[in-house]
Image: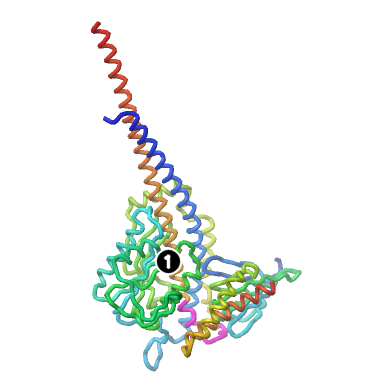
Amino acid sequence: MANVLDLRRRIRSVKNTRQITKAMKMVSAAKLRRAQERAIASRPYSAMLASVIESLKRRIEIIDPLTGEVRHPLLKTRKEKRVLIIVISGDKGFAGAFNSNIIKATMHFLDRNADKEIDVEAIGRKGRDLFHRRYPSAKFLEASEEDPRVRGQRQRAARIEVTGDHPHLLEKLSFERAREVGEEVVARYVHEETDAVYIVYNEFKSVIQQRVVVERILPIIEIGKHEIAAVEEMTPEERAEAGRAAITAGVTVEPGEREADIREFEDEAKKFGTSEVDYIYEESAASIFNDVLPRYITSQLYHAMLESVAAEHAARMTAMDSATNNASEMIDALTLTMNRVRQAAITKEIIEIVSGAAAI
Amino acid sequence: MADKNQLRVRLVTPDRILVDQTADSVEVPSSSGYLEVLYGHAPLLAELAPGEVRLHAGVRHESHRFSVARGFVEVLPERVTILAESAMKPEEIDLAAAQKELDHGHKLWSEAGDDAEKYAHANEIIREAESRLESNKEH
């Protein structure tokens, strides 16, 4: 049996671990609050954008009456032969199953679409590392080192290739950076380099309502509606665990006052541009429409990234909470053993003394 | 604020609701030139050009300015909503960054060759950077 000194050392070491996990949990909780606020604050914009498109759509002819073709390239559906999948994972580990869930969902997707050529665009360091190990990078003719935006003809060597990565995008997430990605994606679709664009990300409604979704963002079929190809919900146990973690970290599970404010605004936002009056259009409705569609894609991407960041912090908070609980349990168990060992030693000594005395 | 003839102005960006207040009038840079909106304007929907949104409010006619780019504006008789992908106060503008953008735009422009799409893209960057620099200078 281990001696008292060893046990005491173990306890001390587990206590240190607990301190670290507890600190990490509180840090994640603070980051989560901020990320949550950002995600909520971005909602009015996307809602307004969606409603303006919706209202414009009613006013213009999307389908050319002469040729029967869709007028805008982003609305055109083609047979899916080449697919682009954008994987939004986390930058760091220690977040429970967060990253592995994303990767699993992506792998399922790749398996299901075994007959197509797939480009992977990885956002977030964890996903990038994995896909770079597994699949070759796309090769371009006359690609220059200093400016990655300049690239020539694509040379496809394998069925699944990694076309790009954005490792530091999520660290300091800004709309500007998201826009660069969005514009590139739109350009690729317009130039028919790809026939459909999907994103895999962790949707974040609240701490206890999250799911991994695979969503198709291009072509645009219906505006303001998420076209979800696959989904993985939280299990009830995970949900309960997340709820517990949130309460102990002081993060609200229920929507707060601020959120109620935003919601009211959101409802109003849905009416944006939809008044039943005849607008004067500065340009033709069609031209505004053409400009707004790419923005819609960017806004969707940005929103997915914001939600994913919030979900990552939430996952880390939950993981660190259960790590802290496990450490506490372990300390209790070790303390019990230690006391028992100590008591056994004392008892043994007493017996020795008593029996020694009796022998005399 | 008892005055009834006030416009309710909102400036919304992807990150936040930047402005939500009332104003006497507002100037908006649409893609075909600046337009000023007063209370009771006819419904209008226009695209934004890079430029400045100017809010005029209060008795002393103090004005607030915001440098905006890429977005839309919806005008209703009693309400103006501006959606912009980028919007900031003149004092928030990073001059060095704007200058760099401008140089980058000029570089793209000279390299565009005869690709119309690239030209348009470069021009857009140049216009945006110029409007930002301009806005900061006035400040």
- Is A332 above or below relative to B134? above
Residue A7, image x, y percentages:
34, 32
Quick check: can you spot residue B51? yes
Looking at the rendering, the stretch of residues picked out in magenta corresponds to A279-294
| Quarter of the rendering containing residue B43 | bottom right
Tell me the kind of residue under disc 1: Ala
Residue drawn at point x = 76 percent, y = 69 percent? B60
Residue A81, image x, y percentages:
29, 79
The quadrant the N terminus of chain B occupies is bottom right
Residue, disc 1: A304
- Is A326 above or below relative to A151? above
Residue drawn at point x = 28 percent, y = 11 percent? A354
Residue B132, image x, y percentages:
61, 75
Q: Chain of mark 1?
A: A
Q: Main secondary structure of the magenta part?
A: helix
Depth check, front residue: A176 or A249: A176
The quadrant the C terminus of chain B occupies is bottom right
| Quarter of the rendering containing residue A125 | bottom left
